[in-house]
Amino acid sequence: MKIPEGDPNERSVGYGGRPDRDGRVTLDSCIMDEFSNIGSVACLEHIKHPISVARAVMEKTPHVMLVGDGALQFALSQGFKKENLLVEASEKEWKEWLKTSEYLPKANIENHDTIGMIALDSHGNLSGACTTSGMAFKMHGRVGDSPIIGAGLYVDNEIGAATATGHGEEVIRITGCHLVVELMRQGKSPQKACEEAVARIVKLTKNRGKELKDIQVGFIALNKKGQYGSYCIQSGFNYAVNDNSGNKLIDAAYYLK
């Protein structure tokens, strides 16, 4: 996870992430282990690896979430380096956006590509992590689902784990990843659990009179048996699987045809 966070060409997380409407790069991240230890940071500026700060919150504080300047001060106290995260390409895009200042995020581009990882180790223990720079040109202070345990990430070592990407407001609305894990607890496969979670978002979106084509949400899930699945609202989401058979990239099934 630290590799994409440190890549200036990766435009959705860490160094190189797209800024908010004020030109400030704010990062969100969380982590959860097999013992339900959790750590999270939100609206963190100037630190290239928010996932490492989230882990430090988990391991070195009595809290589970730090935000804004408090998260930054904690990171600096732990030896993290303060850096400018607004790369030239992102700054150019932001200045172009300022000409109209229209907040119309493009599905699969400006509201997608959160990095979420869930894992089952050789001892049968589950863990997960999630990191993002959030929606491009969001209001300063906006926080999506990614740093919120139960929304953007959830791990239950008896059942399974799930993580999400896409329009964070919609994931929060259904506490998405906790829902996926609870559906697996009821006996559903990871695939069916992801499909039902997406179906709930679809129903709520339609009930509110919103257009599905304007949003993207995707879930990936993994159960205790090592079975996995994924589902999203529209095409354009893929996920990587690394197991004993090797590495593979899979295009997720989706609702909108």
Image: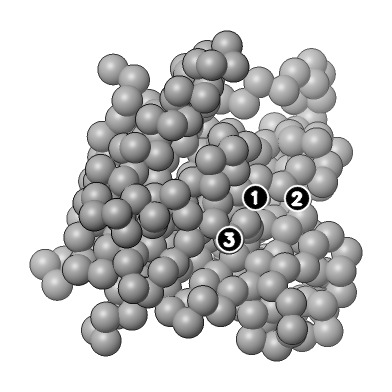
Cα separation between marks 1 and 3: 17 Å
**The C terminus is located in which quarter?**
top left
Q: Nearer the viewer, residue 24 or 118?
A: 118
Q: Which corner quadrant of the image does residue 111 belong to? A: top right
Instruction: List the single residue furthest toward the front.
Output: 186
- Mark 2 = which residue? 25
Cα separation between marks 2 and 3: 22 Å
Give the residue type that dot 3 points to: Ile
Cα separation between marks 2 and 1: 7 Å
Give the residue type that dot 1 points to: Ser
Is there any visible trace of residue 61 in the rendered image?
A: yes
| Labelled pair 2, 1 in contact (Cβ < 8 Å) | yes
Q: Earlier in the sequence, mark 2 or mark 1?
A: 2
Give the residue drawn at x 25%, y 46%: 191
- Mark 1 is surrounded, within 10 Å at the Cα level, by few (under 14), some (14 to 19) or many (20 or more) other residues, namely many
User: Which type of secondary structure does the marked residue at label 1 adopt?
Assistant: loop
Circle on res. 133: 1
Circle on res. 149: 3
Residue 11 position within the rendered picture, expressed as x and y whole percent measured from the top left: 58, 46
Q: Earlier in the sequence, mark 1 or mark 3?
A: 1
Residue 46 versus residue 100 in the image, above or below: below
Give the residue drawn at x 21%, y 67%: 226
Give the residue drawn at x 27%, y 63%: 223
Is there any visible trace of residue 12 in the rendered image?
A: no
- Mark 2 is surrounded, within 10 Å at the Cα level, by few (under 14), some (14 to 19) or many (20 or more) other residues, namely many
* Pair 1/3: label in front: 3
Residue 85 versus residue 101 in the image, above or below: below
Give the residue drawn at x 40%, y 34%: 198
Give the residue type that dot 2 points to: Val
